[in-house]
Image: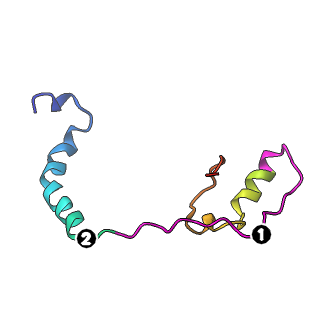
Amino acid sequence: KKYWRNLPEASIIKPLIEDAERMTGAMIANAATEPHKPQRRPEAPMIRRPATNDLDALREEAAHCRACPLYKDATQTVFGEGPD
């Protein structure tokens, strides 16, 4: 506690500690949620479009892509590679 006065977040430490038991109790009391079921690969191959270097066009296309079920829970587009 003697170092708390030097921390910018010191003002919220005490309320966090006081509220910790209530918060953990609520988490323990709630039932565990079921994990998402693994996604199956689509039977039909994805439609291939001509390659482009236009990032704005790619960003727009990716934002509205519905080629697989990943879009259902998505909140934003993240470019990368999925599982093989």
User: SS for tag 1?
Assistant: loop
Q: Residues within 10 Å of mark 1 (few under 14, many from 20)?
A: few
Q: Residue at x 10, y 33 (%)?
A: 1
Q: The residue under label 1 is which amino acid type?
A: Ala
Q: Is residue 49 magenta?
A: yes
Q: The residue under label 2 is which amino acid type?
A: Asn
Q: From the viewer's perspective, is 65 left or right of 76?
A: right
User: SS for tag 2?
Assistant: loop
Give coordinates of residue 84: x percent, y percent.
64, 51
Judging depth in this view, the residue of 80 and 82 nearest the camera is: 82
Residue 55 higher or lower than 7, as above or below:
below
Q: From the viewer's perspective, is 68 left or right of 16?
A: right
Q: Of marks 1 and 2, which one's residue comes earlier in the chain?
A: 2
| Extent of the magenta region | 33-56
Give coordinates of residue 80: x percent, y percent.
65, 46
Q: Kindly identify which numbered label has been placed on residue 44.
A: 1
Q: Residue at x 72, y 64 (%)?
A: 64
Give coordinates of residue 47: x percent, y percent.
83, 63
Q: From the viewer's perspective, is 81 left or right of 5?
A: right
What colour-coding does the image apply? Answer: rainbow
Judging depth in this view, the residue of 75 and 42 nearest the camera is: 42
Q: Residue at x 20, y 38 (%)?
A: 10
Give coordinates of residue 34: x percent, y percent.
39, 70
Q: Is residue 42 magenta?
A: yes
Q: Residues within 10 Å of mark 2 (few under 14, many from 20)?
A: few
Q: Residue at x 57, y 62 (%)?
A: 74
> Magenta stretch: dominant SS?
loop
Q: CA distance from mark 1 to mark 2?
A: 40 Å
In the rendered image, which quarter is residue 63 located in? bottom right
Residue, disc 2:
30
Closer mark to the observer between disc 1 and disc 2: 1
